[in-house]
Amino acid sequence: MQCTNNLKQLALGMQNYHDTHGTFPAGRWGGVCACCGSGDERIGHSFVWSCSFFITPFLEQQPLYDIFTSEIESRSDGRWPVPWLNGNTNKTNLRPLYTTVVSCYVCPSDSTARTPSNSGQVKANYGFCNGDSCYYNNQPNGSGMRGMFVTKTWHTMAACVDGTSNTAMASEFVTHTDPAIAEVTNANNGLVKGSFYLGHNYETLSANPSVCLNMRNPNDQRMLTGNYFNNWRGHTRWAGRLTDGCSFTTILPPNSPSCLVGSVSPYYSGGIASAASNHSGGVNVCMCDGSVRFVSDTIDCGNTSSPAPGYGNASSIGASPYGVWGAMGSRAGGETTASM
């Protein structure tokens, strides 16, 4: 019940944001950040603030938001601060944003979510829908951005052509349960529900998203095999980034593996971010009308071997190839979700 209430509160925050600003927030936004070197590395830290943060004033967290805006106003170089305070992981130097538990972002089914990471950063269990494509889905103007919350794009309610009751707004993910494990490792013990597999490029993942399903450890289906990130899934980046930290895709079924593009650094990465929870058999999903549904792990996902919308000859418009689950993630695919 509390999980459902949390999602309804997030939906209300989004709707109030829309009433105030005339649009929903972009899934990922922000100017070039004042951190992390120069050139490509600095550009890689653009757009690092997520919609999860931008609705904080509508979640009774105005003071957290005011700290951020006051810092932007005080800067003379026009750069945005990074959410994690210039990359510093010292507990005494973290932003209040990253040490303050926002209760409606924490699901009671995740027993470790209220325990800070080993760097002192709090966690979150909810993110917003990036859509049903993994093709450049974390990039500005990416052709695979079919959900309501995407990079550098502000959608109005009218953009939800499929109907607000048919289009997913928010869902759940599980935080990694062992903050002592190194951030990037190939120790073959990354939890499917709390980690991302690393190693695919956009072309491989987009040509056949089902390859991500093969990243389960054959000897233990709860685990990933190979290189993985263990603490970006709702762990240390709830207010920043998109696919890797605070969103989900409707491609693979709930509680499937998640796969980021890249081998080490996720700064540019998109990919597959599967919804996940510790509830038995599925996840809660909040629709754009504020209603909450329980979606089973066995929901129709069509053909997960089909190329991602926007990749190659696959059209970026029209019905999702990923069944009912994909249809829920696309805002204007022309599908209905009645068969769910």
Image (cartoon, rainbow, N blue to C red):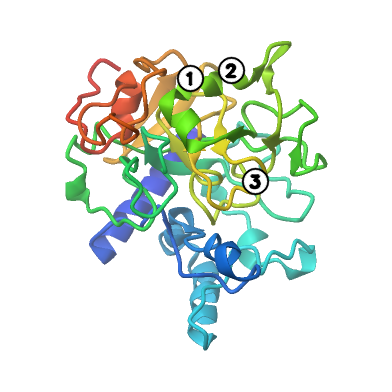
Q: Is residue 34 above or below residue 206?
A: below
Label 3, residues with CA under 10 Å away: few <14, some 14-19, many ≥20: many
Of 105 and 334, which appears nearest the observer?
334
Q: Nearer the viewer, residue 334 or 104?
A: 334
Of badges 3 and 1, the one in the foreground is 1
Instruction: Give how far across and how far down residue 118 sits, in percent.
Output: 79, 50
Q: Could you tell me the amino acid type at mark 3? A: His
Q: CA distance from mark 2 to mark 3?
A: 24 Å
Pointer 3: what residue? Answer: 235
Whether tag 2 and tag 3 are in contact, CB under 8 A, the answer is no
Q: Please name the amino acid that badge 2 sits on.
A: Asn
Judging from the image, what secondary structure is the residue with disc 2 in? Answer: helix
Q: Quadrant of the C terminus?
A: top left
Residue at numbered disc 1: 210
Which residue extends farthest right? Answer: 180
Amino acid on which the number 1 mark rests in the picture: Ser
Helix, strand or loop at label 3? It is loop
Earlier sequence position, callout 2 versus callout 3: 2
Is residue 6 visible from the viewing direction of this image? no
Residue drawn at point x = 17 percent, y = 48 percent: 158
The residue sitting at 34% across, 21% down in the picture is 322
Left/right placement of residue 178 relative to residue 40 reads right
In the image, is residue 229 above or below residue 293? below
Examine the rendered structure and indicate whether residue 305 appears above or below residue 114: above
Q: Secondary structure at mark 1?
A: helix
Please state the horizontal and vertical placement of residue 140, each as a whole percent of the image.
38, 55
Q: Are marks 2 and 1 in contact (CB under 8 Å)?
A: yes
Disc 3 to disc 1, C-alpha distance: 25 Å
Q: Which residue is mark 2?
A: 214
Left or right side of 72 for 169: left
Circles 3 and 1 in contact, beta carbons < 8 Å: no
Q: What residue is rendered at 42% in x and 35% in y?
A: 134
